[in-house]
Amino acid sequence: MQLYNTLSAEERAQLIDEAGKERLTLSFYAYAKIEDPKKFRDELFIAWNALDALGRIYVAHEGINAQMSVPADQLEAFRDTLEGYEFMRGIRLNVAVEQDNHSFLKLTIKVRHKIVADGLNDDTFDVTNKGVHLKAQEFNDLLEDPNTIVVDFRNHYESEVGHFEGAITPDVENFRESLPIINEQLQDFKEDKNLLMYCTGGIRCEKASAYFKHQGFKNVFQLEGGIIEYTRQIKEEGIKSKFIGKNFVFDHRLGERITDDIISKCHQCGKPCDNHTNCSNDACHLLFIQCDECKAVMENCCSTECLDITHLPLAEQVKLREGLQVGNKVFRKGKSDALKFKTSGDSSVQPLAKAQTKNIRKKITVKKVLLGKAEHYYTKSKIAQFLIENKELSVGDKVLISGPTTGEQEVTITEIHVNGGPCETAKVGDQITFELPFRVRLSDKLYKILPPSENA
């Protein structure tokens, strides 16, 4: 019986595009006592694989934590798989603010020691003895109370691009670092202050609120459903957002825009920017903020050293990263001395610019057709090479280049070369080249964006 992925991310992406169906990115969690996490994990994989549900899920004796992509037409069937477990009956699903059919491209369910690593070894700590849950308007009201201290229990790379007004934003790389730091900082306020906390979807605050009640704090509150549910409520109910900027998410999108305020800077040039990039050097994969100009010049790299490495022959790159442990990670969340404009940990940062907001949901309805795949990128001349496997491509066409690392890049074709010479239209079987300001990879796909007349 299949209990693992049989398709690569690239193969899965192609199947999703060919199916042409809308998918929903969602998340949920539940703290519960699970006697046999391995058996639970296998049952979930069998049920969800049958529904073409994808995502990154952790299960442990203390519960489940899931971020997923589910076909919209299978949502009710997916809910039914949860209802089969008493502790997940009626569970809230946090549906993403912005949707992307490629948010997850594999179904990965891992058994962990804990669903949220906390560094605690205290048998008297009861994670179910949690703080008071607040809805969006209640959270806003308590935020206005001068007797309230609000704490962001996310990591530095999350809070740097967006946070609630006046929040304490610890400059930490993981949740377990934040608990002792905040506990020490707030020792004098256990009795007389409202301790208000939030995170992305609520799972970290659920544990943090129980921890601080265990530590003797009297008035502990948390944002129900985290930033994701808060955003849904303020949009539906017309409530003013007290959150400014972008909400970092742990999938291909790397962020959902909540307000058009940009509160962070490009880590390389200092220009207002809140777009995260994954360093293109497979031996690095550092997560950092990079503007479009630096992305083009640095070719998605965090430093000149990494840029030089990406220009080496592949065999030399593989040799250089032998023995390193970061190459197989989605991204590495540390810091680098090469990045001079980080502002993480500073909650006093004011908006630096306004973003040009895009309707991501509308993007899903735009029709596109797969043309072919990337074969090579000539870094010195900035020329990309593709093989046309389906349909034709002509000068003037708009195309989408998409891949797990490249993201989604739209360009208009101004010139095509086939067999070394210019042409107006490339046909199936042609090996084409054209200039691109960004690097493409073998996993990238080339799509033709159909004009509005063909989208109807």
Image (cartoon, rainbow, N blue to C red):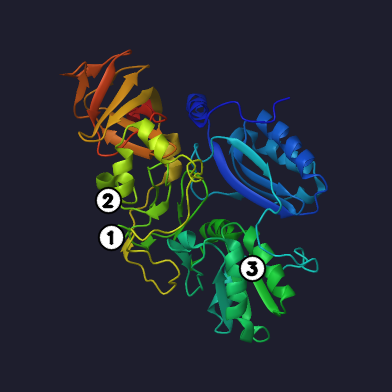
Q: Where 310 falls versus 35 (above or below)? A: above
**Numbered label attached to residue 294:** 2
Residue type at tag 3: Gln
**Label 3: few (<14), some or many (≥20) within 10 Å?**
many
Please give the residue where the numbered disc 1 appears in the rendered image.
271
Secondary structure beneath dot 1 equals loop
Which residue shows up at 83% across the image and 48% down it? Answer: 35
Q: Where 63 falls versus 139 (above or below)? A: above
Report whether residue 93 is seen: no
Instruction: Looking at the image, tell me whether mark 3 or mark 2 is earlier in sequence order.
Output: 3
In the rendered image, the quadrant that contains the C terminus is top left
Secondary structure beneath dot 3 equals strand
Residue type at tag 2: Cys
Task: List x then y, in percent, for residue 234.
Answer: 53, 61
Please give the residue where the numbered disc 3 appears in the rendered image.
222
Q: Is residue 399 left or right of residue 93?
A: left
Residue type at tag 1: Lys
Q: Do the numbered discs 3 and 1 sit on residues whose CB atoms are within 8 Å?
A: no
Q: Quadrant of residue 386?
A: top left
Q: Do the numbered discs 2 and 1 sit on residues whose CB atoms are within 8 Å?
A: yes
